[in-house]
Image (cartoon, helix red, strand yellow):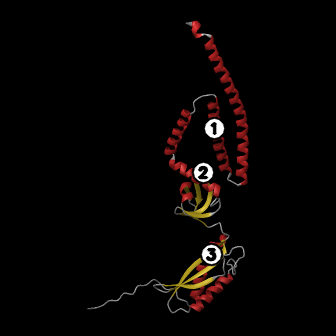
Amino acid sequence: MMEKFFSPETYSVLGQWALGFCKNLLVAIIVYIVGSFLIKWAKKLFVKMLERSKVDTSLYTFLTSIVSVVLWFTLIIIIISILGIETSSFIALFASAGVAIGMALSGTLQNFAGGVMILLFKPFKVGDYIEAQGYAGTVKEIQIFNTIIRTNDAQTIIIPNGGLSTGSLKNYSTEPYRRVDVDFQFAYGTDLGQVKQAIQEIQQRNPLILQAPVKDSPVVAAPWIGLTQLGGSGVVVNTRSWCKGSDYWTVYFYMNETVYQELKERGFMFPYQRMDVNIINK
């Protein structure tokens, strides 16, 4: 029995298997060395691409780690395959684990994807004044999963990036200039020519209000005043004044306060809301 087990044919089969395994092992070692070099080269190239794109540092560090894990996982699967080990079971195991993790963390992954999109395409940056998801404030920090903003009354708001990346968003800081729209209501019978002249003088006195179009911003125009509505208690006059974005609130309060004070002193009437009630006696 022992002689049959250690027969020349057995030694021949074992020798062929050992020879084949050694060849595969040698190829696997070569693939590992070459693959390691290529992974290091690919990581450096990827980092340079991200740096040239001026991607946020925290993001490209995280993306580099993900790329590194994917490349090393691919290299290991290739080496296992070269050694003759069945890889389909490994791939199926990792795939099923990935699906389970993805389902469990669907909301978190959506916020992560939103954070990546925000940091890559930069619809806003730290320091911008934005309005989104029912909140308005200055962006203090952009994280992978959330964006932190501070409102004008010093409240800290944490907004998930998933909604920010897919919903509507107003960014008041992308343009260097903003238009200040203020409506004033005057009593019926008011001389509109005198009203417009008085408001125009107020606009011209403020150095923060631009008095002519700007070459680098085609939307900027000279101050404008016009009748926009016949209201229930009076006529509505709209004023439009262009200024730098940082001066918006200064000009806004200036127009409200100055127009009210000066036009009241000149005898113009600002009507109250009123209702006429007719009583019919039968």
Q: Choose mark 3 or mark 1, whichever is in front.
A: 1
The numbered mark, 3 or 1, whose residue comes first in the sequence reads 1
The numbered mark, 2 or 3, whose residue comes first in the sequence reads 2
In three-dimensional space, the C-alpha distance between marks 2 and 1, rounded to whole angstroms, equals 26 Å
Q: Is residue 145 among what the camera can see? A: no
The vertical placement of 223 against 104, above or below, is below
User: Where's residue 159, x and y in %?
Assistant: 55, 56
User: Where's residue 240, x and y in %?
Assistant: 61, 80
Q: Is residue 122 left or right of residue 190?
A: right
Q: Which residue is mark 3?
A: 179
Quadrant, the N terminus: top right
The vertical placement of 270 against 121, above or below, is below
In three-dimensional space, the C-alpha distance between marks 3 and 1, rounded to whole angstroms, equals 55 Å
Q: Which residue is mark 2?
A: 144
Residue 218: which numbered mark, if any?
Answer: none
The residue drawn where x is 57% and y is 54% is 114
User: Where's residue 105, x and y in %?
Assistant: 51, 46
